[in-house]
Amino acid sequence: MKKLAAAVFFDAFVLILLGLIIVMSASSTYSALKFDSIFHLFNSHFFKVVLGITLMGIFCFIPYELYKDYSKPAIILVTLVLIVTLFVSPAYKGAGRWIDLGPLTFQPADAAKLFLIIHIAALIEDKADWIRNYREGFLYVFFWIILISGLILIQPNISNAILLAMISLLILYVGGAKILHIIFSSILCFFAAGIGSMFFAHSRDRIISFVNSLQSGGDLHIQVKQALYGLGSGGILGVGIGHSKQSNLFLPEAYGDFIFAILGEELGFIGSVIVLSAYLVIFIAGILIAKKAKDQFGQLLAFGITISIIVYAFINVAVATGLVPITGLPLPFISYGGTSLIFMCVSVGILVNIALSNTSEKQDMQEELN
């Protein structure tokens, strides 16, 4: 398990460092024009990287069992914060998702994702004998999924709400819930997400534009089109770090949601495959950690964290390549950001601790046998 812990930590660390380089390249032109300094966005990102790596190291040594005892107060707190966000967050591109804390902008949905995964894992372990009973087990856990995902949905942050509900239901399935209950709940979530997507103008336009491009060969969204230009021009080996043309304001917000296009342009097909392979390593190592964890809470927590990382990475790349509608989700560890990066780092720290705790348990048993 030590090797698995090292693989997860090292992979995340390398992706974060790579993200620093790509963010610098992707944001320099925009920073120079808007802030009169090519380092403005990079400096902001660098501060968050330092904070994230520090927290990742700290959480590697905090016993993950502690989170089970505090999962309910934490989920209640984040629920209240999500409610407050609906009233105090300034609207940006049709959505109110952030709380301004001065030097930091806090997005509660990122905290809610991790807290909900922890709470679901704790509830399933607590209600292991009841989870297959719809009324007395499943419905109680599903209430929290609907509550948190619903509050995120109406911000509106539809893509995050959909993915959070999907990840949560996957944890329920792995935790022993009946497949019929999962299917019924998935249909309910899909129906609610569909209504939400059509109700809010910005998401409706994105979906209609995407469907039209598939059906009639209509124009792709400008960001997707420019992202594909960037990926295509990268070739096999890429144009080199700092030589991206798309980062010169051709690709809007190149340092954020579409950073994979800049990465593909500068590092080429081979560099892109290596990055995707790094996510695959985290996925495989995380699943093995979950499988070998000493208790059900650790198993489900490790599984939820691992799935959330790989799903968000897959969706981000799928958006950049035009496979799914634009979602506004960052590429884990690489995209410019604040709370997303920080909570991803915390998640990795927790995952590493689950692996190390299991290793310590095995060592204690071997010492007793000897």
Image (cartoon, helix red, strand yellow):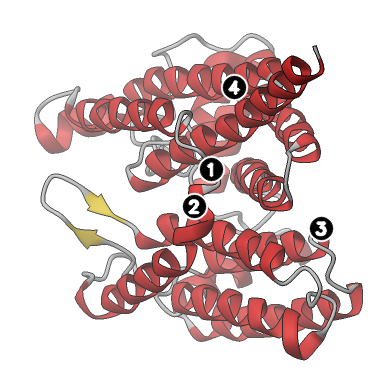
- Number of numbered discs: 4
* Image spot of residue 231 (x, y percent): 61, 28
Gap between marks 1 and 4, in whole Å?
Answer: 45 Å
Q: Seen from this angle, which residue lies furthest bottom?
A: 135
Determine contact: label 1, label 3, CB under 8 Å. Answer: no
Q: Earlier in the sequence, mark 3 or mark 4?
A: 3
The residue type indicated by label 1 comes to: Tyr
Residue 86 picture quarter: bottom left
- To which residue does mark 1 refer? 64
Towards the viewer: 218 or 227: 227
Q: Is residue 316 above or below residue 98?
A: above
Q: Considering the image in quadrants, where does the N terminus appear?
A: top right
Give neighbour class at mark 3: few <14, some 14-19, many 20+ (Cα, 10 Å): some
Q: Earlier in the sequence, mark 1 or mark 4?
A: 1
Gap between marks 2 and 4, in whole Å?
Answer: 46 Å
Gap between marks 3 and 4, in whole Å?
Answer: 42 Å
The residue type indicated by label 4 comes to: Ser
Residue 67, numbered circle: 2
Residue 233, numbered circle: 4
Badge nearest the viewer, 3 or 2: 2
- To which residue does mark 3 refer? 174
